[in-house]
Amino acid sequence: MDFSSPSPPMGSGQSPEALMEQVQAQLQQAYAEELIETLRGKCFDKCVTKPGSSLSSGESSCVSRCVDRYIEAMGIISRSLFSQQLLFKMFRRKTTSQAEQENNEAALREAKIKEVKTLIGELSGRSSLYCSDPCLKRYLEARNWNVGKAKKMLEETLKWRSTFKPEEIRWNEVSGEGETGKVYKAGFHDRSGRTVLILRPGLQNTKSLENQMKHLVYLIENAIMNLPEDQEQMSWLIDFTDWSLSTSVPIKSARETINILQNHYPERLAVAFLYNPPRLFEAFWKIVKYFIDAKTFIKVKFVYPKNPESVELMSSFFDEENLPTEFGGRALLQYNHEEFSKQMNQDDAKTADFWGLVHSSSEFSGAEIAPEPIQTNP
């Protein structure tokens, strides 16, 4: 029996024995159809490494043994013939529908994006600009493509943005927070072309949670605005030089930072490298990590200079020539507040233009430089 062809219709003129055989064959075929999806996941996907190509002898044996085990457990008679027919159909369906399956998944995701768009209703002004299709996709991704949860998450962000107004923050409002260079946009990108934010918690210079969050949100928005067209995420480098319990941010500040990043900027963080944190930080981390959701948690990487595996991981994201010496690289960087302020003022004009806002130019004073390599260690 070939499972790929329908059985002839039942009718008069057949002997009872022939009719019974046909009924059994059709029942077996229907049963096989029901089993295909299950066995594909349990056997085919497990054994076949390159869908779309011919099965190797090892792959064929692996799938055959796997299918036989499941069929035997189910008590199916004529196991050998049944297995061969089922294997043929599994392989044919797997190899011929790979592109179709990908297209179906893409179509399903597009449909969910449209569904979220319909559910949130007509938007105007900045909310309309914010809720682009890529934006809706990020919220769906953050909620495992659950439309209801993504809609709720997006609505909470729109409410937050309407009160926090991140697009209205200008550098002259937060430049005091940045005088020490505790957070700034680097003058280099990671290997994938992502914008990089450098955070140095040991240089904390203020006490106001409100101003600290305003400064961080400003730099997140700025980093996003400066992303290349083919990128939607940024990378964070966190340097623990001079970090201590006296300079560490309060738990409340850390929790608010996490809340803003993962709930209002979903899927914007590609990776965060925590470089050589002291042992004291472990106690702080044990508390903070419980505020981090699973999707964000796996993006946090600890790097220790004496741990080759962690160093190699960071090297896969950053070119050693661009990476500052503080992170084990070869570039010598210094932060110049005055030059960085000029750069931010120029970016403020671009931000205002994007959101349709009026920008008033301001001059800043300080004593720092844009975060660019100024020389390389030999």
Image (cartoon, rainbow, N blue to C red):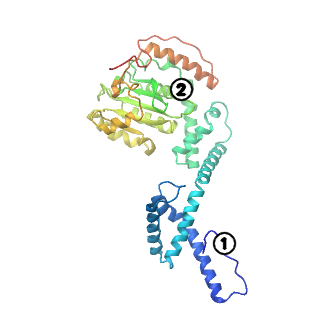
Q: Distance between the Cα atoms at labels 1 and 2?
A: 58 Å
Indicate the position of residue 148 as horizontal and vertical percent values. Answer: 58, 49
Q: Is residue 140 above or below residue 50?
A: above
Front residue of 122 and 323: 323
Vertical placement of 169 versus 260: above or below? above
Q: Which residue is mark 1?
A: 6
Counting other residues with Cα less than 10 Å from the Cα at mark 1, is it few (<14), some (14-19), or many (20 or more)? Answer: few
For the residue marked with disc 2, what is the amino acid? Asn
Pick whichever of labels 1 and 2 is earlier in the sequence: 1
Please name the residue that numbered disc 2 is placed on.
226
Residue 177, relative to residue 36: is it above or below? above
Disc 1 + disc 2, Cβ < 8 Å: no
Q: Residue 85 at x, y = what percent?
A: 55, 70
The crowding category of the residue bearing disc 2, from other C-alpha atoms within 10 Å (few below 14, some 14 to 19, many at least 20), is: some
Q: Is residue 257 visible?
A: yes
Q: Where is the C terminus found, in terms of image quarters?
A: top left
Q: Nearer the viewer, residue 160 or 100?
A: 100
Q: Three-letter amino acid code at disc 1? A: Pro
Element under label 1?
Answer: loop
Q: Where residue 134 appears, x then y in whole percent? A: 59, 38
Q: Is residue 96 left or right of residue 265?
A: right
Label 2, secondary structure: give it. loop
As drawn, is 71 to the left or to the right of 308? Answer: right
Residue reaching furthest right? Answer: 12
Image vertical order of residue 85 relative to residue 139, above or below: below
Residue 200 located left or right of residue 64: left
